[in-house]
Image (spheres, rainbow, N blue to C red):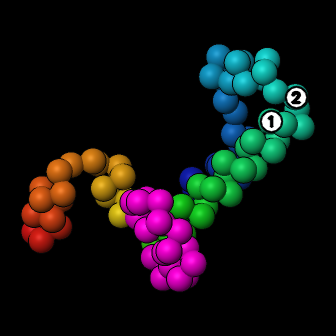
Amino acid sequence: MQFAWISAQMPLTTPRKFVSSAVEHYSEKELVHLIVTCSVTSLVQRFVAIAQPELEDSVSAFLQQHNLETNTLNLRYPLPKARVAQLASC
């Protein structure tokens, strides 16, 4: 619990060198929009990875129509299909 207290008391800071190009390119409002979008996307990714909800029929059809991968292991570690099947069976 001590860590939770520390993180609640200390604001998250990012060194300027990591964000200087974004600050120069975007306005303050655009940066807030970008940060919120990335944060929500991250939360959705984590939810889907943990809960693994069933895809709706229209979403499945779209993914199949455009030949888009849904297996996150295949996306993150692209290996030949036979090798992935072999690893999954272990």
Quadrant (top left, top right, bottom left, bottom right) of the N terminus:
bottom right
State which region is magenta.
51-70
Note whether 38 is above or below 51 in the view shown: above
Comparing 71 with 27, the one in front is: 71
Question: Does residue 65 appear to the left or right of 11 in the view shown?
Answer: left
Which image quadrant for residue 83?
Answer: bottom left
Determine if the magenta segment contains residue 14. no
The amino acid beneath tag 2 is: Ser
Note whether 41 is above or below 24 in the view shown: below
Q: Secondary structure at mark 1?
A: helix
Determine if the magenta segment contains residue 56. yes
Q: Residues within 10 Å of mark 1 (few under 14, many from 20)?
A: some
The amino acid beneath tag 1 is: Leu
Using the rendered image of the protein, determine whether residue 51 is visible from the camera's viewpoint.
Answer: no
Residue 73, image x and y in percent?
31, 58
Q: Secondary structure at mark 2?
A: loop
Q: Which label is found at residue 31?
A: 1
Marks 2 and 1: in contact by CB < 8 Å?
yes
Give the residue at x 10% y 63%: 86
Give the residue at x 41% y 64%: 70
Check the image and name the residue furthest to the front.
65
Q: Which label is found at residue 27?
A: 2
